[in-house]
Image (cartoon, rainbow, N blue to C red):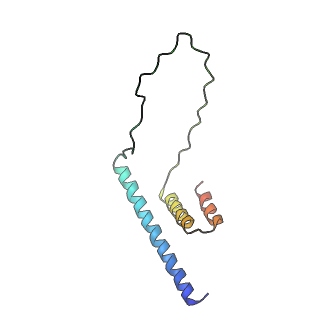
Amino acid sequence: MNDNGIYRAEQRVKEMNRMAQQYVRQGNSYMNNANRQQIQPRFEPVGPNKKQPEPPNNPAPSLPQRQEFPRPQFQLDNEKLLIILIMYLLIKEKADIKLIAALAYLLL
């Protein structure tokens, strides 16, 4: 690789680092704002407009109730947020899929 190629690679790495730091700052400011105030939902909940029909006098035999499984709760700390941002940049730059998969494994 010639000197020009090395220089371009160094510049690209610096640019990617700058972009990653910018994304981290944006994420931190978003999280700080979210902690200071309640985040308003984008959409209002949709409820039924009509009254619910009254159940019939002779209801049909009920079906077994569906078992509800708890949803996993994910905590996003600064390290996970940074890994996600790096993954985003790597996907955008069409990087090696094995590297992206390894970063995704770190999120588990």
Compared with 95, 75 (above or below) is: above
Q: Position of residue 9 (x, y in %)?
A: 54, 80
Q: Position of residue 36 (x, y in %)?
A: 34, 50
The single residue placed furthest to the right in the displayed view is 98
**Looking at the image, which residue is at 53% across and 10% down?**
57
Q: Is residue 33 left or right of residue 70?
A: left
Q: Is residue 77 left or right of residue 99?
A: left
Specify the quadrant of the image occupied by residue 38: top left
Specify the quadrant of the image occupied by residue 2: bottom right
Compared with 41, 50 (above or below) is: above
**Looking at the image, which residue is at 61% across and 30% down?**
67
Foreground residue among 39 and 41: 41
The single residue placed furthest to the left in the displayed view is 37
**Looking at the image, which residue is at 60% across and 69% down?**
95
Q: Quadrant of the N terminus?
A: bottom right
Q: Is residue 67 left or right of residue 37?
A: right
**Looking at the image, which residue is at 39% across and 45% down?**
42
